[in-house]
Amino acid sequence: MPAPIPNGEAVQRAKGNYYCPNAVAAAEAHKAHLMVTVMNQAENSEVAGMNLYSKIVSGCLKQENATSVYTSGTVYTADFYQKVAKEYLPNNAIPIMIWVYVGLRQNEQGNQLYTSGMAKFGKDEIEILNSKINMGTLHASLSSMCSYIISSGLVLKDGETIGFSAEQKWAISHSKSVYAPSEFSLKIDIQ
């Protein structure tokens, strides 16, 4: 498309990217955009589709004037996206930081986290709300959970629990989304 993404959407979304300090500048610099879509076939999995998508996007980002990619609700600089894809994809590892964006917010009730990108894998978006636990710990925990859910095909349901050990049990509920870009999301009660 011979025009920037309309309404300053890419610039606005780039402001939330904590991985790429230059994401806003990259989004502001773009003069045109290319849309990439991979349609999964019946015999292909969502993970295989996203692997292909990431390889195609990485190839597109090698173009001289490519500045960034807008995916999973945020903007990644070309060099960051390519570096992560190159590091993870050859090892069949899940490059969670470019496949699922974890949004971070804080308010008087505590730390708020949400995912954007789980739906690409046929999964519910996830939210952690009103937690007093350190934001870095929450981010690492949610990223690890997302990677595990995607790689294992795990389906979380309302009323179940999840944790990283037999003793650790965080309750899961399904309700209307607060921050996630979906009508409903799974809430994980990490307090």
Image (cartoon, rainbow, N blue to C red):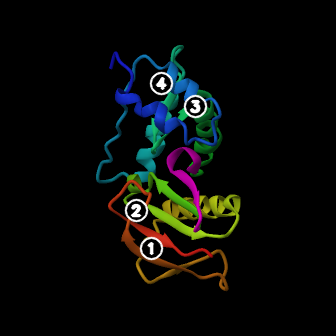
Name the residue located 50 percent from the left edge and 35 percent from the top edge: 55
Q: Earlier in the sequence, mark 1 or mark 2?
A: 2
Q: Position of residue 129 (x, y in %)?
A: 53, 68
When the figure is inspected, residue 48 is found, relative to residue 122, above or below; the finding is above
When the figure is inspected, residue 77 is found, relative to residue 144, above or below; the finding is above
103 in the magenta segment: yes
2 in the magenta segment: no
User: Badge 1: few (under 14), some or many (20 or more) residues near its Cα, within 10 Å?
Assistant: some
The residue nearer to you, when weighing 185 against 90, is: 185
Name the residue located 45 percent from the left edge and 52 percent from the top edge: 116
Q: Which residue is mark 1?
A: 156
Q: Which residue is mark 4?
A: 60
Contact, mark 3 vs mark 1 (Cβ under 8 Å): no
| Amino acid on which disc 1 is placed | Leu
Q: Nearer the viewer, mark 3 or mark 2?
A: 3
Instruction: Tell me how far mark 3 sits from mark 2, CA to CA.
Output: 27 Å
User: Which residue occupies the extreme left position in the image?
Assistant: 42
Q: Which residue is mark 3?
A: 23
Q: What is the magenta range? A: 96-109
Name the residue located 42 percent from the left edge and 62 percent from the top edge: 178
| Amino acid on which disc 3 is placed | Ala
Q: Which residue is mark 2?
A: 123
